[in-house]
Image (tube, rainbow, N blue to C red):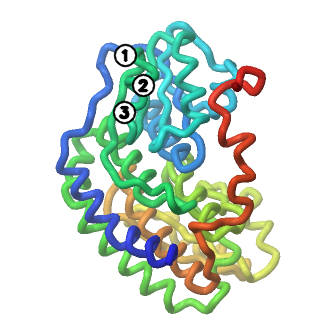
Amino acid sequence: MSLAQLKRRCETLAATLSTARETPAPRVSSALDPRPWVITGVGASEGPARFYAARLAAMGRPARFASMTAVNRGLTRHPDAVLVVFSYALSPNARWALAERPHYAAAVAVTRAPTRVEADFPRVECVAIEGPDEGELLVRVEAPALMTLWALRATLRPDEAAALDALGEVCQRQFERAMAHFAALPPGALDQLALVTDRCPESLFSLRWKWLESVATLDPPVWDLLSVAHGPLQAMTDTSWRILAMLEAGDPLSAALQGCVRAAGARCDVFVSPWRGDASFFVYDAVMNAAMLTALGHRPRDLAHWPHQGLDLPLYGLKGAPDEEP
């Protein structure tokens, strides 16, 4: 049942993104622009937070990602900084981060639960993300994609606008092609996986987390294309490795990458985005959804009743320092 539900979400994600694309993107107050930014998220919200931090930094803004633990333990406090907390469903750990608001010049919550933020943290600005509740399954598909879409639209450059116009159509086509590609592979072909990109590896963190929470093998590394020759290639000592190379169209390094990987006895599948820039994330996300569904088809797993369910509460349930918890 849970796998059928997950499959439906993957199949309709392109339409979900298209609908979100048609609604106005909430804006963060422009008065905050000159300040340094501390951006955090945890679990499925960490990838969008890292994506947003990388986007702002690429624009020349003083922005950085900080782990939720660092923020919640007060290690990133700065009276002139803006704290941004990504949390789709407003987890207890995210509430702890928002309670750090007095130690910053301003704070912003990117969340599906703005009314709860406004009620409990009235001095926190809200970016409301419209989307479904995915809480009944361990792995999230729509939530990280919708938050990442907001992060892209909030920092959109003029040359990226055309990509958003075709977002749903391109992502659906890529998902269907990737499903057909992976269906032709033998069982176990995705057991030893790594991702390679010619984009910022930080921007693909969500894809690692999706795999960790669904297929339940260790999350695959994301390597910069040139870094493959500086350690990863030398670690491919058996033929079980499969590289998913996520590249821009016409990347001149693609042939060299494939030659190195195949010479090492590993497999290399190249997936090309038609766009330059960070909109490519959604093409690669569609590929990863197809890979995830294929792997789960060979090795089914109940994502509604996962191992160690409830045993995470001593950490997951923290909404304040342990010695302050009621």
Residue 28 falls left or right of residue 84:
left
In the image, residue 259 lies at what x, y percent?
A: 61, 76
Residue 214 falls left or right of residue 131:
right
For disc 2, the neighbor class at 10 Å (few under 14, some 14 to 19, many from 20) is many
Mark 2 to mark 3 CA distance (whole Å): 11 Å
Residue 86 lies, with reference to residue 310, above or below; the image says: above
In the image, residue 151 lies at what x, y percent?
A: 37, 40
Q: Are marks 2 and 1 in contact (CB under 8 Å)?
A: yes
Query: What residue did someone put label 1 on?
Result: 32
> Residue flagged by tag 1: what amino acid is it?
Leu
Q: Earlier in the sequence, mark 2 or mark 1?
A: 1
Query: What residue did someone put label 3 on?
Result: 114
For disc 1, the neighbor class at 10 Å (few under 14, some 14 to 19, many from 20) is some
Is residue 257 in view? no
Closer to viewer: mark 2 or mark 3: 3
Query: What residue did someone put label 2 on?
Result: 108
> Residue flagged by tag 3: what amino acid is it?
Pro
Viewer-nearest residue: 84 or 282: 84
Is residue 48 in view? yes
The secondary structure type at the circle numbered 3 is: helix
In the image, residue 212 lies at what x, y percent?
A: 64, 62
